[in-house]
Amino acid sequence: MLPQLSAEQVHAALPWHPLADALTQAFATPPQAPVRTAHAMSSADTLLLMPAWDDHGIGIKLVTVIPTAPRFGGHTVDATYLLLDRATGAPRALLDGEALTVRRTAATSALAARALAVTDPEQLVVVGTGRLAPWMVRAYHALLPSLRRITLWGRDERTAERQATVLLDEGLPVSAAARLADVVAEADIVSCVTTATAPVVHGSWLKAGAHLDLVGGFTPAMREADNVTVARARIVVDHVDSALTEAGDLVQPLASGVIARDAIIGDLGALLRGEIIARRDGRDITLFKSVGHALEDLAAARLALSRLALTTHSSPGT
């Protein structure tokens, strides 16, 4: 019977440090991962397909975006991940796609920040209060132990306060902010996880040396940071072709001439391999634009399955 990993099993099988190590290895020797395809099933509903493969496995994430799904007890965005054997093409496992996505996305952003932010950053601001935001806080806190203050901001202040309380109860140094500009001005790292179509972070707010992590925007119409931000920053992306096609935070300023193509220094894999240098000194502003890369899903799924198998085989009575 095909193993099926629930959201709880996926989270349990992907501790932050082993996941970061698996992602580092994946970016060092990336698998084949075409730009994802989007199929309009109606004027409102979309099916996204994200495949990746290497010599050891094949994976594909299927994502549905159906705004009316909550009426029928579902989620607006839902995801499933299928892992297959590379030699035979036979299915190996089915994983909860949302848990896989939030986990690998948050870990990738923290991994990028370790390479791009100033040494020993102390203050993080997370912008947004959606389902991904708490996982960003958890990943950053685990993978950047120098962080001493984490601030959460959302358009609905009460939602931000509720999320901050939950995270504070977990032992994380989190509080909610009322004024975004004030906390961004003090932050070493600003991570945006919104669905904004107009900038929420402005370049004039950023202090010298800040690192900006843009995660939420995944279409050319979406923006989280303004043109001043992009023009000031040294830019690294998770996947160049995808970013140039899908990331409004780059597509729009490139189209208007605010930045040139060479403003994008390279991708995260090249950075981790030491092939490019993004931060030259403590005053540079760096920017990591994540649109989601299928190699991250494949690496995380393979790790989850291997750790689950290890746990099962080592359990008493097995």
Image: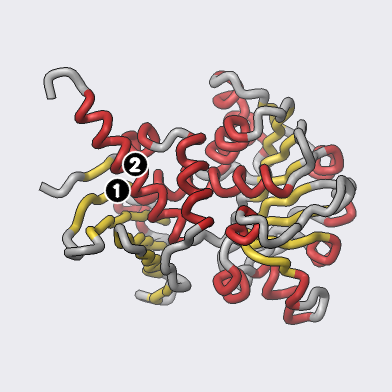
The tag earlier along the polypeptide, 2 or 1, is 1
Q: Label 2, secondary structure: give it.
A: helix
Using the rendered view, name the quadrant where residue 314 is placed: top left
Drawn side of residue 56 relative to residue 121, left or right: left
> Do residues under tags 2 and 1 come within 8 Å of each other at their CB atoms?
yes
Drawn side of residue 156 relative to residue 14, left or right: right
Q: Nearer the viewer, residue 189 or 44?
A: 189
- Can you identify the residue that label 1 sits on? 95
Furthest-left residue in view? 1
Task: Find residue 146 and name its label.
Answer: none
- Can you identify the residue that label 2 sits on? 304
- Residue at image position (86%, 42%) is 185
Q: Nearer the viewer, residue 68 or 38?
A: 38
Residue 209: image x %, image y %?
A: 85, 47
Label 1 neighbourhood size at 10 Å, few (<14), some (14-19), many (20+)?
A: many
Quadrant containing the C terminus in the rendered view: top left
Q: Is residue 145 visible?
A: yes
Drawn side of residue 228 relative to residue 94, left or right: right
- Residue at image position (57%, 26%) is 167
Residue 128: image x %, image y %?
A: 63, 45
- Residue at image position (67%, 23%) is 173
Q: Label 1, secondary structure: give it.
A: strand
Q: Is residue 41 above or below residue 296?
A: below
